[in-house]
Image (cartoon, rainbow, N blue to C red):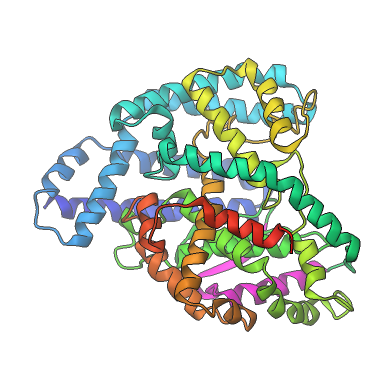
Amino acid sequence: MSFEKLDTLNHTLHALTHAMAILGADESTNMPTGGGEARAEALSTLAAMEHEKASAPEIADWIDTAQNQDLSVDQAAGLAEFKRLYQQRTCLPAEFVGRKTKSAMMCEQAWRGLRARGDWNSLAPLLSEVIDFAREEAQMRADATGLAPYDALIDQYDPGSRMAEIDPIFAQVKSFLKSFLPEALETQKQRHGKRPLKPLNGPFPIEKQRALGHAAMQQVGFDFSHGRLDTSHHPFCGGVPTDIRMTTRYQTDTFLPGLMGILHETGHAQYEQGLPRASAHWPHNLARGMGIHESQSLFVEMQINRSPMFWKWAMPQVDKHLGTHVFEGWEIEDVLAHVNLIEAGFIRVDADEVTYPLHVIMRYEMEQDLISGAMQVKDIPEAWNAKIQDYLDLSTRDNMPDGPMQDVHWPAGLFGYFPSYTLGAMMAAQQWAALVKEIPDAPEQIETGDYSAINAWRSKNIWQQGSRLSTPDLMKSATGEALNPDYFIAHLKKRYGEE
């Protein structure tokens, strides 16, 4: 009966996770300012309850016994993923988790004020403590899993991904981008010389932008009977598969950031809405990590929505919802010049498709050294400046807010997360190549706004697979080969290279 006990437990954990997800999404969208303290208490209570139930000692015996029961293939897959997660939950002592969490919270809260002042000297000792905890955590997870310490941290976000595979991939992409970026910028300059950037004719009322976003979401395949779009300070996709809470933010002088934010989050939402509904309370039916999740958002945003095929459908929609004055006298090339503008900049979250991977790779390289102990906090500013000069020909010397203080990840103790962003971009390019090989007229279908075959491919190969496979194995299953950066490089050459 051990499997039955685990099934009951997973129902409870699933319900708690559901409640926390909706409460968390509501906190960022609809909660009145006076509700913060009580909401924090409610969420912390539920989180503690969920952790206590999910890491109870008797679960280990249930797992051992269940492994000897006569299980179906699906039940065995669910048990294997639950066992992996249980090992991750229990390999850190509770008292260590408490001290680590407090350290990260104090550092993150201090970072929010110190970044604005560029006060690195005040942040450094707090960050040093956070990194000490990260090293200790990495070693404990390594001891429990047999992985290298930094691999054990990566595995929290992209199960199955390892430095041994990531290092050569990132090295190839970095080498390509360092030579390609100057060429792409020169090509863009020449294009703008022949076809100057046309100004967007705003203002663009928020309610009209929202209507345009809704139309694009519905066309791509978002299910509004199981989700909604709201507004928040930072776009996100939260909630649960049957009740997706998606947000964006708007500017009235331009509509493109709001629309692109909506479409990016729609990719995340489609993945969640497309996960298996049967036995949804078991973890093998959840999304497979951050890299795959990012691949779904970037598949929609980069492979589809920043393409000429999409804008053949979208330009009339802009006329319909925002007014014919917006694109009066424009051609698709004029829109794409705005949508796919590239520029080397300091800030990762504002970076374009070409420069973004370099921001991620430099952080990945630094994280490896920080976790191994080869780099200390005092070394970060100089190392950051050296890398951004080498990769993007910029300098952050005496500019901490735009340098190593810009991201929340390290103050919050989130080491191993950064690789997922660029791994996801490469996965998206490879998935698109595999899809077009199977559905050659997919680009023409996008022009007409028909996503039925495209979404059927994504559902079969990604969404319905849940977490049954590791990240690398899921890519092999979906595309027929391991992650291959050649597809991403070919994508960038086609979009940003010489005509």
Q: Is residue 299 left or right of residue 184?
A: left
352 or 182: nearer the viewer: 182
Q: Residue at x 41, y 64 (%)?
A: 463
Q: Is residue 139 left or right of residue 411?
A: left
Name the quarter where the C terminus is drawn.
bottom right
Q: Is residue 376 left or right of residue 233?
A: left
The quadrant holding residue 204 is: bottom right
The quadrant holding residue 263 is: bottom right
17 or 348: nearer the viewer: 348
Tell me if residue 148 comes above or below residue 329 in the rendering: above
In percent of width and height, residue 166 lies at: 47, 40
Tell me if residue 337 comes above or below residue 163 in the rendering: below
Q: Is residue 185 left or right of residue 419?
A: right
In percent of width and height, residue 223 lies at: 52, 74
In this view of the protein, can residue 290 be seen by the observer? Answer: yes
408 or 493: nearer the viewer: 493
- The tally of labels here is 0
In percent of width and height, residue 346 lies at: 75, 38
In percent of width and height, residue 293 lies at: 49, 55
Q: Main secondary structure of the magenta part?
A: helix
In this view of the protein, can residue 196 be seen by the observer? Answer: no
Please state the extent of the stretch shown in magenta in the rendering. 205-231
Check if residue 218 falls in the magenta segment.
yes
Q: Residue at x 24, y 49 (%)?
A: 80
Q: Residue at x 54, y 80 (%)?
A: 441
Check if residue 482 falls in the magenta segment.
no
